[in-house]
Amino acid sequence: MGTHTCRRRAWEAWKDAGLPLSTPSNEACKLFDATLTQYVTWTNDAALGGIEGCLAKLKAADPAFAMGHAIANGLVLIGTGSSVRPVPLGRGPGVIAPASQPLIDTHLLPCPGDPEGGRSWPRSPNFPGACELWEQILRDHPTDMLALKFSHDAYFYLGYQEQMRDSAARVYPFWTPGVPLSSYVKGIYSFGLMETNLYDQAEKLAKEALSVTPTDAWSVHTVAHIHEMKAEVKAGLDFMHGTEVVPARRRLLHGRAGGRRKDWRPGVRLRPLLRAHPSLQEFPSSLALAASSGALHRWTRWALCWVDTVGPVQVDTGSDMLACHNYWHWALYLIEKGEYEAALTIYDDHVRPHVWVRDPDTGASRLRRFPPRVLGVSVGERWRDVLPVTREHSRDHILLFNDVHFLMASLGAGDAQTTQELLTTLQEASESPGENCQHRLARDVGMPLCQALVEAERGNPDRVLELLLPVRYRLVQIGGSNAQRDVFSQLLIHAALQCTSGPHRNVARSLLMERDALKPNSPLTERLKRKAAAVHLLQ
């Protein structure tokens, strides 16, 4: 069975792989590998201090290691949680190695237009340009995982679905089983296939990946998307339940095979649990040993495992960076079924405690899928939990995808000041976009979408349609997945259901017929059709 235990390759191993590194430090090479592995597997290895701990040790091992700076700075930028500022090379904290260092590492290619001949950050984020450089690297070094993963994430942000698929397709044949992390490339490729509606191929490849590495949360994520897009609710729920925890782990903790306690519930992380309940260190003894050694990764899949001695109590060890997003997919199946309270329970137990800026959709979009005016479902004060995470980034404008979800949070929480600040600064960015592709897109797509959200909150459904209908086929350009952007399709449908003007009378009918054709047998679509029939919009 595969695990996501961090590999730590020394300099010679990197050279043998055709990827020589520019540091003489074996320790730096090993820490680079450990950081890369955690990034690819969506985990923080506690034994190594997680990604942040590895990066700190990496910098200490060789402060001049070019690829150390490339992965450190790249993770900050690809995380989209910090604004980019033009910083000349070597003149600020955390920047890449001096220009005098011989550069074997081709991730650090020169930025044009630097009058001093050194390398500096571009003056605006340029994801398309970065992708071109990563593709150049992959043509010469198809097993360069950092270039593949950075480009995969950037294509996702840009809504470049075909490029995301084809980038992986071009290098996939080189990732033979003996290449470290090769099974994860199956998951990366399968996601691109899924986003371009090649569901059968995507599912086959994702399940191949899971047969090698059951802890591969990204492949679980792909299969979750497939069942969601095909409205296969029961299959999706069964799959998420079946992959949440390895069956052998259940036997160890419960003393029986399969199943789980009906009353088990998340709550406490493992190490704090052991400190608070020393008796657990003796029962079972293997649990305490696993906790101290980090070996729990051998038994868990993408999320959580459980003990039922003083509780039940949660043991949290899985793919911690993606687990709450996978629970978001779990909740989508419940929303599809109309089980809104159950979906909110999933949100409260698994999503609410872990909302973070790189994945604003997980919190904001989930809550947006409970529109009280239409469904009579209240999310209560939950918006106020999301707002502190998003409010401090309301002026960043790194990704439009982030902006619209930050706006959902401020609107939902009733924070008029943050809402106005976000809209005003985004408008200003769209008027002077320079080479920033996101700011260029803001004028024609981002601002109408944001204004539509505002008008929906104000109860102006006809205005929502006027703003959204002309740009609906361009929304893919803001990035994210088809499943994530479906919240905007639902926004449009709900607005159409409430429209009163003659020109918009048949829009709801048209949208629902279209949705039914694309996603047959969807319980959510059926409920919306019944709603439309009740207000005489399907006649």
Image (cartoon, rainbow, N blue to C red):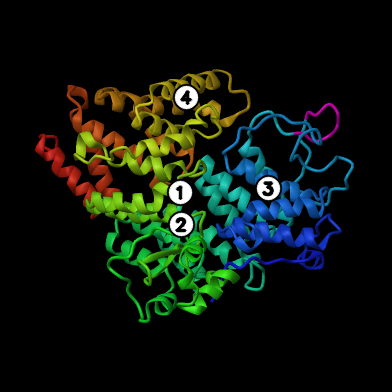
Which quarter of the rendered picture does the C terminus lie within?
Answer: top left
Q: Image point 86% across, 40% down: which residue? A: 99
Q: Quadrant of residue 122?
A: top right
Instruction: Point out which mark residue 134 bears.
Output: 3
Label 2: how many Cα within 10 Å (few below 14, some 14–19, many 20+): many
- Give the x, y percent position of residue 249: 44, 75
What's the residue type where badge 3 is placed? Trp
Q: CA distance from mark 2 to mark 4?
A: 29 Å
Q: Which mark is residue 376?
A: none
The residue under the point 14% across, 35% down is 537
- Mark found first going from the N terminus, 4 or 3: 3
Tag 1 and tag 2, C-beta contact below 8 Å:
yes
- Earlier along the polypeptide chain: callout 1 or callout 4? 1
CA–CA distance between discs 1 and 2? 9 Å
Q: Could you classify mark 3 by the number of other residues whose Cα lies within 10 Å: few (under 14), some (14-19), or many (20 or more)?
A: many
Write down the residue under mark 1. Answer: 354
